[in-house]
Image (cartoon, rainbow, N blue to C red):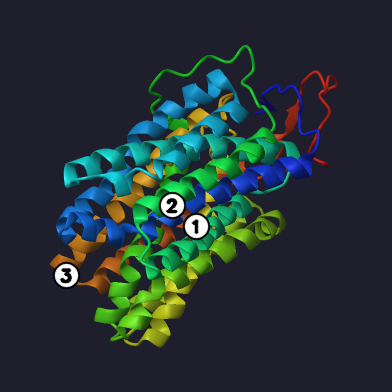
Amino acid sequence: MTVTTPQTPEPLADPRRSRLSIALVFGVHGAVSGTFVTRIPWIQDRLDLSPGQLGLALVMPAIGSSLAMPLAGRFVHRHGGRTAVRGLISLWCLALALPALAPSLPALCAVLLVYGATAGTADVAMNAQGVEIEQCLGRSIMSGLHGMWSAGGLLASGFGILAAHLDLDARLQLAVTALVLLALAQPVCRSLPDFRAPEAAEEPPRFALPPRSSLVIGLVGFCAVFAEGASMDWSGVYLKTVTGASATLAAASYTAFSLTMAVSRLAGDAVIRRLGAVRATRLGGATATLGGVLVVAADHPALAIPGFALIGVGIAVIVPLAFAAAGRIGSNPSQAIAGVATVTYTSGLVAPAVIGALAQATSLTVSFGLVTLLAFALLLSAGALRRAEPDSTDNKVTASSPGNTSGKDLSAI
């Protein structure tokens, strides 16, 4: 199947600038998430929320995101990639200021639904833009883009931790940070190429359910995100209760795992270019499976910590590859990406609860046995991401526009 990149007035006149711009968009998106996470304790204290009440509130972003992502395909189709990314990332930045303003638990839940909805739609739009740029470049960049998301989150969380240490009012900090990130996003988005759907392309429905062709790809992402969510949310608890780690070491597990993910994603494109998407997925699945085995067998932090690190390294490139593969389905990448994102991120919603319920019924060790099995499933399902091969003959990409009337192959850029 030949996929033609939607026509654009100025198709990648400056490829390096286009790639840098979309990378910075990913960084801004991650910075919003990283900032919010660091001020959750302040919000909990201000509203005097119990752990159960806070848990209920923190489910709302995932619900809002899952409900809103299917709407993104139509928005991107109507307004074009650049306008969609600029508008949605702006809403996402502004939404950062809202949670700290909520006066009660019901208000916080409502605000976090909106917060999640803006996060999900912006996520779909920027991933669609990233896939379009990747196709025009003819080489893998999606792993690096997701690495920039992680890096943005880590950098912003550092500022958030400093603000918390200085006991700054979160209402002021989140509002100022929202405006700063909004200001940073505007010139970055103006530098994005203006990808638009072909004139003959059918407009997606208002609420686009995942295409059947994207479901298998989404299930691969589901396995990876389940392992990611379980490790990020439960690694500290696992280290403390199963291996007897100190509270300090257990608390540092989230930062260590996030750093491992960020570094692996930033380096992942080189691995994908060398091995291809399918072999990189199989290598990642094998690495994550080995990590899961170490975690399950661990009776000491010295064994569990490398295990969690290997899980992070192994799953790092899977979600970027899933989005890249989805972006090569049909003439409207954003619709397929929305479908894959909906299936994939649902995993992040259910993983912590499933791990907790299984641990309650059995043990945390058994729970991470399930994580290990899902990591092993990546080995068996890697072929579903074959579409993500940038140089595959099935994915040969051309960009036609007034500036490229010959339909010249741009993969050599």
Query: Which of the two marks, 1 or 3, is nearer to us in this view?
Result: 1
Residues 210 and 65: in front is: 65
- Lateral position of residue 8 relative to residue 266, left or right: right
Q: Position of residue 228 (x, y in %)?
A: 41, 60
Q: Secondary structure at mark 2?
A: helix
Residues 208 and 149: in front is: 149
* Badge 2 or badge 3: first in the primary sequence: 2
Q: CA distance from mark 2 to mark 3?
A: 33 Å
Q: Secondary structure at mark 1?
A: helix
Q: CA distance from mark 1 to mark 3?
A: 34 Å
Residue corresponding to mark 1: 153
Q: Position of residue 30 (x, y in %)?
A: 50, 52
Q: Are marks 1 and 2 in contact (CB under 8 Å)?
A: yes
Q: Is residue 366 above or below residue 50?
A: below
Q: Position of residue 362 (x, y in %)?
A: 16, 70
* Badge 1 or badge 3: first in the primary sequence: 1
Q: Amino acid at mark 2?
A: Ser
Q: Which residue is situated farthest in the top direction here?
A: 200
